[in-house]
Image (cartoon, helix red, strand yellow):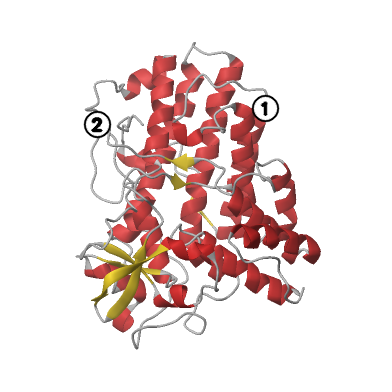
Amino acid sequence: MKNIISILTCAMLLMLTACSIDEVTDPNGVQLATLLENAEIGDLNALVNGTEARMRRSWDVYVTSTGSVSRELYLFDADPRNTEDLLGKEGASLDNNTFYLTAPYTTRYQTVLNCNILLRALENTPEGSAAQKDGYRGFANTIKALMFLQELARLNTNGIRVDVADPENLGPILSKDAAYDAILDLLNTAYGQLQGAEFAFQLSSGFDNFDTPETFAQFNRAIAARAAIYAERYDQVQGFLDDSFLDDHSALDLGPKHVFSTASGDFLNPMFKAPQQSGDQIIVHDSIVNNIREDDARISKFRLRNNPTSQDDLNGDYELAIYESSTSPISILRNEELILIAAEANIQTGKLPDAVNYLNIIRNAYGLGNYTGPETEEALTDEMLYHRTYSFFAEGHRMFDLRRYGLLNSTFLPIDREGDQVFTEFPLPLSEQ
C-alpha cells in the first residue's frame, strides 16, 4: 500500500505535544490549499489511500496496552511502563500524557483529520459526479466512525470529542452515551451516502470483496453492530447484522484487513515478533493458555518458548504466534466477530436457541463439537465470552468484553504481583483537559 503522508495542522489534529505544520515530503503529495480549493480526482484518491494507510498506525500499542490491562498478554520490552503503569504496579496510575495513551489516540484523530480534509475538499472540487462524491463521503464517514469507536472503547466514561471538523470551533467532549449516539448517527449517514454511490478510488488488497459501495456498506453495518454491542444496545444489533456481511456459511476470516509490505514508504506488521527472540516479545498470560479447552484448535495462536521468559517479576512460557510473517495482514473486522456478535445479541434478547446455533458455528470450526451445556443466559454468556477470548486473542477486544459484563476487576482476573491494580478505562489525554 502506498503510504501518503498526511498534512497535519495543530488545531485540527488535537495534537498531544507541541506541534507545527509538517512539511510534505512525498513527491506525490499535495498541498492543503490545493486540496481544499480545487482538488482533482487524483488528489482525492491520494487522501483515501493515505487514510487507509494511516489507520494502521499504533495498532500494536492499542492491542498490547488494552491486552495488558485485561491480563491476556504482557509486552516484555525495554520500556518499564508496559509492566508498571498498565498493571498498576505499587499503586501506579495510568499516565494521561504517555505513549500507550497518546500514540493510538493521536493516530485515530490523524485518520479523522484525513477524512475531514477529504470531506471539505469535496465541497469545492468541480470533479466527480454526485454519485462519486457520495462514494468518497460514505468511505470517509465510515472510517471516522470506526476511529471514534476505537477510542471511545478505551476512554469509556471519560468520553471523546467527535465534532472536530472546524479547528476554530471544536465541539465538546461527549459523554459515553452521547458519543455512541454520534458514532451510530455517523455510520447511518455514511450508509445512506453509500446507497447508489460510485467509487472513483481503489482500496488496497485488504479490502478485496469490500471495495464497492455495496460491499463497503456491509462493512459499515458490521461496524454499527460492533458499536451497538459495545454500547450494550442489544435490541439494535440484529438490524445492523441483517445488512452486514454476516454469513453462516462463509469463511470465518472474511472481512477487511490491514495489509503490510516491504515496499518503499510502507511498513511491516507491528504485531509480528520473530519467534523465540529474547527481547521485545508479546507474552501470552499463563491463564489464557491454562484455560483453553482440550481439542480447541485456537491453541495454535500460542507458541511455547524454548526458554521461559520473565520481566519485572512477571513470567511467561508462551509467546504470540498469530502472524506467520512481518507482512501478514491484520483483521479489521471479520465474519467470525459478526457470528459472535449475533450470539451475544441473541443471548441478551432472550433468543437462546438462536444463540446456541451461532455458538455452534464457532465451536465446530475449532474442533469442539456442538454445545451440550445448559441453555441459560448465564451459561451461554460464559460460553460466548470464552470464544471471544480465544477467537480475538491479542486483537484489542478483551478489555471491553470483560468490562461490559463487570469482569474487568481483580476478583475475576489473575493478579500476578501483590498490589497490582486492574483499570477499567484509559484517561482523557492531558491535552484534552
Please state the horizontal and vertical placement of residue 230, each as a whole percent of the image.
59, 59
* Residue, disc 1: 195
Q: Which of marks 1 and 2 precedes in the sequence?
A: 1
Residue 182 in the figure: left or right of residue 78: right
Outermost residue on the bottom side: it is: 418
Residue 93, can we see it? no
Residue mark closest to the camera, 2 vs 1: 2
SS for dot 1: loop
Residue type highlighted by circle 2 = Ser
Image quadrant where one finds the N terminus: top left
Residue occupying image coordinates x 45% and y 71%: 70
Drawn side of residue 107 relative to residue 292, left or right:
left
Q: Quadrant of the rendered structure where residue 371 is?
A: bottom right
How busy is the neighbourhood of tag 2: few (under 14 within 10 Å), some, or many (20 plus)? Answer: few
Name the quarter where the C terminus is drawn.
Answer: bottom left
Q: Is residue 427 above or below residue 374?
A: above
Above or below 12: residue 253: below
Please name whichever residue, 414 or 234, is drawn nearer the observer in this view of the structure: 414
Q: Judge whether 50 appears above or below 111 on screen.
A: above
Amino acid carrying mark 1 in the image? Gln
Q: Which residue is mark 2?
A: 264
The residue at the far top in this view is: 126
Q: Quadrant of residue 47?
A: top left
Q: Around disc 1, counting alpha carbons within 10 Å, would you say few (fewer than 14), some (14 to 19), or many (20 or more)? A: some
- Name the secondary structure under disc 2: loop
Where residue 281 sits: x, y (%)?
28, 63
